[in-house]
Amino acid sequence: MLKQDWSWRTAHFILQVPRLTDYSPDVSYFAYHMCTQLNFEELVELSESGNSPQPHNSIEDDYIEGSTRIILWKVVERLIDSKTFDQLHLSTPFHVGYALHEDGQTTVLRILNWPNVIQALAQHQTSDHS
């Protein structure tokens, strides 16, 4: 869904629905949170010029925000593929995501270190029969 030329239009919706919230929507409560403000003059100029593609309706994302969400998603996927998170002591479960200051909501892109419930249940049942 996020690999199409038009994906920027629906990136916010695709990455947030369905919404699973077993965490605080405020990223400052996460152990490895980093709040960084990045300013890209080129994006400011593009936004102010009115030359970027515009959403068709109020449900669609702004071109710049939607494209930024896709870039963040790709970065997270690359970090996971390169096993970057293996160097950290992760909580169970460990959420990887982002928050844009405009919407104030944390978007969890991936959950790592998810406990294997089936394996734990099987071990529990085995110990019950011993």
Image: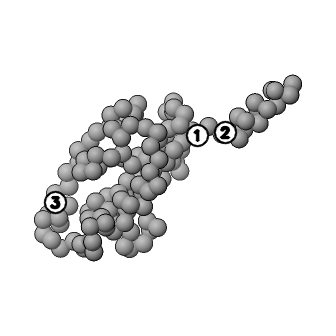
Please determine whether, in this image, residue 75 is positioned above or below residue 8: above
Tell me which numbered mark, 3 or 1, is placed earlier along the sequence: 3
Question: Tag 1, which secondary structure?
Answer: loop
Please name the residue shown 38% across and 60% down the image: 13
Q: Amino acid at mark 2?
A: Val
Quadrant in which the C terminus is drawn: top right
> Horizontal placement of 65 versus 95: left or right?
left
Please name the residue shown 58% across and 40% down the image: 114
Q: How far across and down, in percent of the image, does residue 99 sit?
A: 32, 47
Q: Tell me the tag on residue 114.
A: 1
Dot 2 crowding, Cα within 10 Å, few <14, some 14–19, many 20+? few
Cα–Cα span, label 2 and label 3: 47 Å
Please name the residue shown 73% across and 35% down the image: 121
Q: How far across and down, in percent of the image, does residue 62 sit?
A: 26, 65
Please name the residue shown 16% across and 60% down the image: 44
Is the residue under label 1 in contact with that under label 3 (CB below 8 Å)?
Answer: no
Q: Amino acid at mark 1?
A: Trp
Q: Residue furthest right?
A: 130
Tell me which numbered mark, 2 or 3, is placed earlier along the sequence: 3
Q: Tell me the tag on residue 117.
A: 2
Q: How far across and down, in percent of the image, does residue 16 sit?
A: 41, 55
Question: Tag 3, which secondary structure?
Answer: helix
Cα–Cα span, label 3 and label 1: 39 Å
Q: How far across and down, in percent of the image, does residue 127 sit?
A: 81, 26
Front disc: 3 or 1: 1
Dot 1 crowding, Cα within 10 Å, few <14, some 14–19, many 20+? few
Dot 3 crowding, Cα within 10 Å, few <14, some 14–19, many 20+? few
Instruction: From the image, tell me which residue sits under label 3.
Output: 44
